[in-house]
Amino acid sequence: MTMSMNRRSLLKLMGTGSAAMGALTMSGCTGSPSANSDFAWNDQANAIRARIVPPSFPSRSAVITEYGAKAGSGENVSDAIHAAIDAIAKQGGGRVVVPKGEFYTGPVHLKSNINLHIEEGATLHFIPEPELYKPYVFTRWEGTELMGYSPLIYAYEQTNVAITGKGTLEGGGSPTQWWPWKGKWKEADWGDHPVENQKFTRDVLRQMAEDQVPVAQRVFDENYLRPPFIQPYKCKNVLIEGVTIKNSPFWLVNPVLCENVTVTGVHCDSHGPNSDGCDPESCKDVLIENCVFDTGDDCIAIKSGRNADGRRVGAPCENILINACQMKAGHGGVVIGSEISGGVKNLYAQHCEMSSPDLDRGIRIKTNSIRGGHLQNLNYRHLRIGKVKDAIVINFYYEEGDVGQFMPALEAISIENLHVVEAKRAFMMRGYPHTPITGVSLKNITIEKAEKDSVIENVAEVTQENIVINGKAVVI
């Protein structure tokens, strides 16, 4: 197959009904996939799609300038935003509008029946001063619950909440604000601060979770855990649509324990440490569609809590639909884990395009015997990757290796109609000698060019059909 292949040949390769894939661009992938919401794999996928319905809101609205908000970096419009939210909520709900202009705020807490609408030409900047994000709220940080800094946009136990519009949300993360709390990271010159460093809070928090300390007591005077950008927590009927999200302190879109979530048309652009694009945690019925991810960490990562805390809460992430997204830079395109102790089931990902010299992995599952997790019914089809380091990764040795008591379990993992133009390696699959990787089906996988041999360790019960690497049929 050559780079000049025509559209008809591409559709034939990708399979009937894969018209969502356009011509080739971006280091081998061209164009962006158009929307195709056909989830007709089976009745279950169709039923999930039918259940996911975005919330609707009354027609009333309030513009934050009507409540005293003024544009400009010397202004803090937090009070005006919350006054507008309160006023609209008391009337039964509607839109709170951020109009064209540059506005600066602290955290925004949404209420039921509120749509925070960022107009085209508007930028809502979140002031990077940690004290503004207190008092602490009930939150999760890397899969562990605590009382921590408020997410930049937060909702707790609310129904019908949205963030919409064609404007921009600017998180204020930079080499001088928020990001240095990561500690040593890549080639960053901020070093590894002996005090202002997340590891000192993180390590204590994780031990508290192992010791089953109540969440209300997981409070830190010296807290260096960066807040996520958008985190609805225990909410129902969530919509995030159209906005551009930039320079997040931490993860960008992180719904936790939510039901009926739609993330559509969102552009994630953040290259700081842990800048995951969209991380649903322990959620049910989630659609991620027509989004662009250009991030410093995983583009989409499905999660369900870490270690003892994830098993205590015991809520899998389930019924996840991913459609027609574009993944550029990032650690992984569509990722499961690593905070996956509650398990994940029923994922359907299709018609996505991935490519970048900075994209590390296309499809990735990462866990270990401390995190564990039952991963079942994960389905991927009609995916197109231009340039990537590792195309398919299933790794039971992520970070801590094999030192725990909770073995990962894979069941009904299906990858079909995957085409990769260029990869350093086609596969990196590492199971345990005592718990090999099983339950995987690979069908119609083409890797035009792979520079290095695949890494295959302790893999069993893998169904294979039509795998072609460097022009040759192979059996892994």
Image: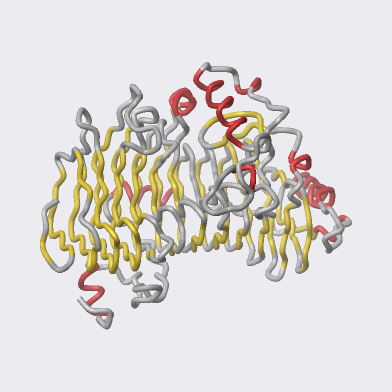
Q: Which residue appears farthest toward the right when viewing the image? A: 68
Q: In this view, does 452 lie above or below 191?
A: below
Q: Which residue is drawn at 12% across and 56% down?
A: 465
- Residue 216, image x and y in percent? 65, 22
Q: In which quarter of the image is residue 474?
A: bottom left
Identify the residue at horizontal 68%, vertical 33% (top origin).
223
Q: Position of residue 357 (x, y in %)?
A: 40, 65
**Considering depth in this image, is 376 or 333 the residue closer to the camera?**
333
Front one among 175 and 82: 175
Q: Which residue is drawn at 67% across and 25% down?
A: 219
| Left/right of residue 55 with respect to residue 475 in the rendered view | right
Q: Can residue 370 be seen in this view?
A: yes
Rendered location of residue 350, percent (x, y): 34, 59
Q: Is residue 262 visible?
A: no
Give x and y (percent) for residue 305.
47, 33
Q: In the displayed structure, would residue 147 be above or below residue 71?
A: above
Q: Is residue 451 left or right of residue 38?
A: left
The quarter in which the N terminus is drawn is bottom left
Q: How many marks?
A: 0
Picture quarter containing residue 399? top left
How is the protein colored in the picture? secondary structure
Is residue 396 depicted above or below 308 in this figure?
below
Q: Residue at x 79, y 45 (%)?
A: 86
- Image height of 189 relative to 3, above or below: above
Query: Could you say which quadrant of the image residue 314 lies in?
Result: top left
